[in-house]
Image (spheres, helix red, strand yellow):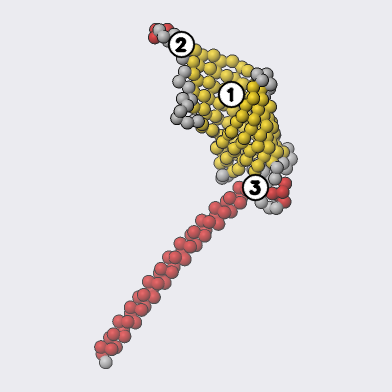
Amino acid sequence: MRKSAYTLLIIAVNLAGMNCYAQTDTVLVETELEQDQEFYYRNKYRYLDVRLGDEDRLLKIGIQPFKPSDNFSFLVFTLHGGIEQKINTSLTAITEINSVMTWTDEQAFHQQGVSLGGRYYFLKKREIEQGRSGNNCQGVYGLFKMSDLLSLITLREKDADPDPLSHEPYLERFIKGSLTPEIGIGYQQRLDYHLYFDSALSCNYNILDKDFGFQISFLFGVLFSYTK
C-alpha cells in the first residue's frame, strides 16, 4: 500500500513538473511570436509611412560607381546633386548638378555640369485616389531635360615625351556650353526616410556636336524632403 502511494506521489510530482515546463515553453514561444509580429508591423507601418507621406520639395545627393567589366581599363564615377520641386500632383521641376569622373591608364576626365528639366509621374493621381501613395515624388516617371547646359571640364593626360626629365602631366580646364535635350523613363523610390533609389533609361542628342547618346543610370543616395 505504501509503495503504491509512493508511486502515485512520484507520478503526480512528475506530471506537475512536466506541466510547468510545458507552460514555460508556451510562454517562450508566445513571446517570440509577439516579438516577430511587433517587428513585422513596425517595419510594415514604417514602409507605409514612407510611401504615403507627402512631399513638396526634395534635396537629393546620390552616387553611381560604374565599371563595365575587367576587360575595360577605365572607371566611371558619378556624384549627383539635385533639387526636385512639385509643380502639381504629377509634374515636378528638376535642377541637377552632376560631377562625372572617368579614369583610364593615360587620361583623367572630370566634368561638372548643370541640367534643367522636369518629370511626369504617370500613375500618381490614380495611386493617390486608391490610397497606395501620398502626393510625393515616388513612382514611375517620364523625364525631359536639357543636360549639361553649362559644364566645367578638367582634362589631365600623361606626357607622351619618353624623356623622364621632362615628364609633366598635361592639364587643361575649360568651360563648355551645350544644347542636349534628353528624354527617358525612370523609377524613383524611397528606401527609408532618408535613403532613395533612382534608376532611368534615357537617350539624348547633342545639337551642337551632332552626337546621339544613350544612358542607363542607377543612383543610390540620401534625400531630405520638405513640405509646406
Q: Is residue 73 left or right of residue 59?
A: left
Q: Amino acid at mark 1?
A: Gln
Please tell me whether mark 1 or mark 2 is closer to you in this view: 2
Q: Amino acid at mark 3?
A: Gly
Q: Position of residue 153 (x, y in %)?
A: 57, 19
Outermost residue toward the bottom in this view: 1
Report the front residue among 52 and 165.
165
Query: Disc 2 or 3, which lies upstream in sequence?
Result: 3
Quadrant showing the C terminus: top right
Q: Position of residue 215 (x, y in %)?
A: 60, 31
Look at the numbered disc 3 and give the secondary structure of its residue: loop
Q: Amino acid at mark 2?
A: Ala
Q: Position of residue 80 (x, y in %)?
A: 58, 31
Question: How far is mark 1 from mark 3, CA to CA?
Answer: 33 Å
Residue 115 in the image: above or below residue 227: above
Look at the numbered disc 2 and give the secondary structure of its residue: loop
Report the front residue among 219 and 92.
219
Question: How far is mark 2 from mark 3, CA to CA?
Answer: 57 Å
Quadrant showing the N terminus: bottom left
The residue to which callout 1 is attached is 112
The residue to which callout 3 is attached is 53
User: What residue is drawn where x is 44% and y is 8%?
Assistant: 161
Residue 45 in the image: above or below residue 176: below
Query: Disc 1 or 3, which lies upstream in sequence?
Result: 3
The residue to which callout 2 is attached is 160
